[in-house]
Image (cartoon, rainbow, N blue to C red):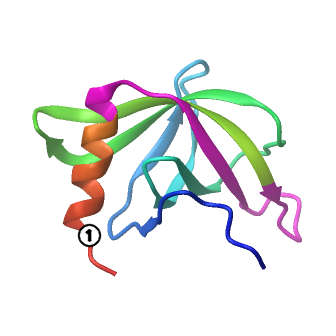
Amino acid sequence: MHENRTSPRKRVHEKIQVVDLNSGEVMGNLVNISTGGLMLLSEVPLAPNRLFQLSLVLPSQLDGAASIEFGVECLWVQDAEESNAPCWAGFQIIDISEQSSQLIAQLMAAWTE
């Protein structure tokens, strides 16, 4: 399989919830992240080609921030076998502030593989 990512992803080493800012609904938990995208294990049904405004709820503050917010596009969804089971979903970050981008880089730097 050809790798299309422009920046490497880091596996998450702690529980980080992902919240849809428009609905306030918890979408699932972060699995991995890079400065350009992320994957999550979603508790809600998702479909590709949708835009979301997301917030990563940090387990502890990072430079005074309790969360990191940005806009994403859902690129793919791998449905679970059971209708009520979680699904995997991949997202490309399409709108992010410089501060949020720096917070993601700091978060990634703190994790080792």
The percent position of residue 40, horizontal first and vertical second, equals: 59, 56
Q: What residue appears at the point 37 percent right and 60 percent down from the top-left corner?
A: 15
Name which residue lies at 64% across and 46% down: 91
Q: Measured along the vertical axis of the image, is residue 12 above or below residue 101?
A: below
Q: Is residue 108 above or below residue 63?
A: below
Judged from this view, the residue extending furthest toward the top is 22
Image coordinates of residue 102 in percent, x first then y, are 26, 40
Q: Nearer the viewer, residue 34 or 5?
A: 5
Q: Quadrant of residue 67?
A: top left
Disc 1 element: loop
What segment carries the magenta color?
Answer: 77-100
> For mark 1, what is the residue?
111
Residue 23 image point, x, y percent = 61, 21
Quadrant in which residue 34 is drawn: bottom left
In which quadrant is the N terminus drawn? Answer: bottom right
Asked whether 15 or 32 is in front, the reply is 32
Residue in the foreground of this view, choosing between 91 and 7: 7
Q: Which residue appears at 47% of the width and 65% of the height? A: 9
- With respect to residue 96, does 4 lie above or below? below
